[in-house]
Amino acid sequence: MQPNLLILGGTTEATAFAKAAAEAGLRGTVSFAGRVERPRRQPLPQRVGGFGGVAGLLAYVQCHQITHVIDATHPFAAQMSCNAVAACTKADVPLMALTRAPWCAAQGDDWTHVPDIAGAVASLNQPARRVMLAVGRMHLQEFAPNPQHFYLLRLVDPPAIPPPFPDHHVLVSRGPFTTDDDRALMQDHGIDLVVSKNAGGTGAYAKIAAARELGLPVLMIDRPAIPVRPEANNVADVMAWIAHTGTDRGV
């Protein structure tokens, strides 16, 4: 039986892996949660929408005879990653996370760490500032308790409802971005604080590098906890893992 992959996508890493899998002649499906209105087209069949928790994902894996699950979701998609660990354990299907290494502060960075979105909201309970709020559109309403700030919002899709801020600017754009462009963007809007998830990778790092160059503080939201699972940081290692587990399991 040939490998039949379920790739939990939504990241550039997922797209890169899907391309490598397709070029290797592997079967598989790329699954998107549906939070982005126009997901990138994939070189493998794709589906959009949730599974219905652990039970739904387990049923999907069993019904479609999935042999390997690759979790290439965003590092902050904690619920999906937790569900994947639980469902794969129940189904006895091997799971590998294709993860981005988290960013680490470099010389010249001025970071304040908070554990989660609620911590970031609490930290913004201060006099008015000009904030680049890089947390994605799903979390905007959570920052409503701090309407005193100007917020620069760069989003992949337009917000479904108006942001809850009297003073803001929405920029709809899809990365990757450059440091030069992000530096100019921050200067144009007079930004004096950047709020960011620790997404890792290169595609969204430009704002961190730009903040360093401008001497701006960053409120860094740490990654959520995920159950222990095998992880790889590059496509080649995941491809090697599939070949190895396929041999071991008679796939």
Image (cartoon, rainbow, N blue to C red):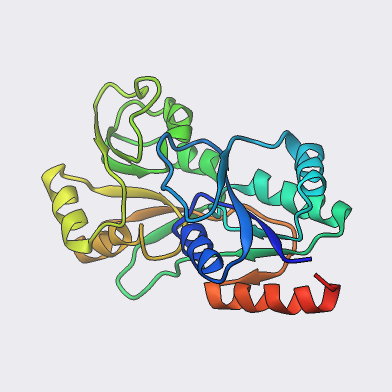
Judge left or right: residue 4 versus residue 156: right
**Any part of residue 215 in sight:** no
Q: Residue 58 occupies which quadrant of the picture? A: top right
> Percent x, y for residue 139?
47, 34
> Percent x, y for residue 215?
23, 62
Number of labels in the image equals: 0
The residue shown at (21%, 55%) is 182
The residue shown at (43%, 65%) is 201
**In the depicted view, which residue is nearer to us: 53 or 236?**
236
Judge left or right: residue 90 versus residue 14: right
> Percent x, y for residue 15?
47, 58
> Percent x, y for residue 188?
11, 45
**In the depicted view, which residue is nearer to us: 212 or 203?**
203
Judge left or right: residue 180 versus residue 44: left
- Please identify the quadrant where the C terminus is shown: bottom right
The residue shown at (75%, 63%) is 228
The residue shown at (88%, 52%) is 90
Judge left or right: residue 138 versus residue 97: left
**In the depicted view, which residue is nearer to us: 229 or 90?**
90
Q: Above or below — where is 139 with respect to 82?
A: above
Q: Above or below — where is 64 with respect to 239?
A: above
Q: Residue 99 occupies which quadrant of the picture? A: bottom right
**Any part of residue 137 in sight:** yes
- Please identify the quadrant where the N terminus is shown: bottom right
